[in-house]
């Protein structure tokens, strides 16, 4: 009969394998985004959602946090010209 520790070890190994598979599938469709301080960004909003009111961004002039946003909702803003 197998010891309980052996079952736990096997479960942990299987969990790590499953996490690696999920990470690999996620990374196939995602893109690396790099922002620097003082970069201008556009925020994707969903105005009908109540969640859009709970995010904040920092004002570039004062540094005061205005709204929070996840990096997946940001897009680099390139000025025209």
Image: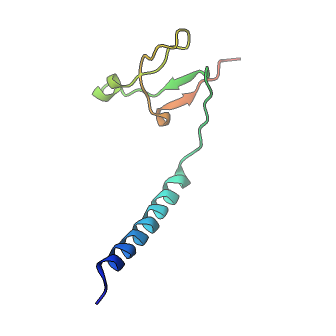
- Pick the quarter of the image with the C terminus: top right
Depth check, front residue: 35 or 51: 35
Residue drawn at 36 percent across, 79 percent down: 6
Depth check, front residue: 67 or 16: 16
The picture quadrant where one finds residue 3 is: bottom left
The picture quadrant where one finds residue 31 is: top right
The picture quadrant where one finds residue 68 is: top left
Residue drawn at 43 percent across, 71 percent down: 13
**Image position, residue 36 (x, y; %):** 62, 27
State the residue lying farthest toward the right: 81
**Image position, residue 71 (x, y; %):** 50, 34
* Res. 49 visible in picture: no
**Image position, residue 67 (x, y; %):** 41, 21
**Image position, residue 23 (x, y; %):** 49, 57
Depth check, front residue: 38 or 31: 38
Residue 8 in the image: above or below residue 44: below
* Res. 69 visible in picture: yes
Number of marks in picture = 0
Looking at the image, residue 2 sits to the left or right of residue 68; the answer is: left
Residue drawn at 29 percent across, 78 percent down: 4
Residue 61 in the image: above or below residue 9: above
Residue 57 in the image: above or below residue 34: above
Residue 61 in the image: above or below residue 47: above
The colour mode here is rainbow
State the residue lying farthest toward the top: 62
- Pick the quarter of the image with the N terminus: bottom left
């Amino acid at each position: 009969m197998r010891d309980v520790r052996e079952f736990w070890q096997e479960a942990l190994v299987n969990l790590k394998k499953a996490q690696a598979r999920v990470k690999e599938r996620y990374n196939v469709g995602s893109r690396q985004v790099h922002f620097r301080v003082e970069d201008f960004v556009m925020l994707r909003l969903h105005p009908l959602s109540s969640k859009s009111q709970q995010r904040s961004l920092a004002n570039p002039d004062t540094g005061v946090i205005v709204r929070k946003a996840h990096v997946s909702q940001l897009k680099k803003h390139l000025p025209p010209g």
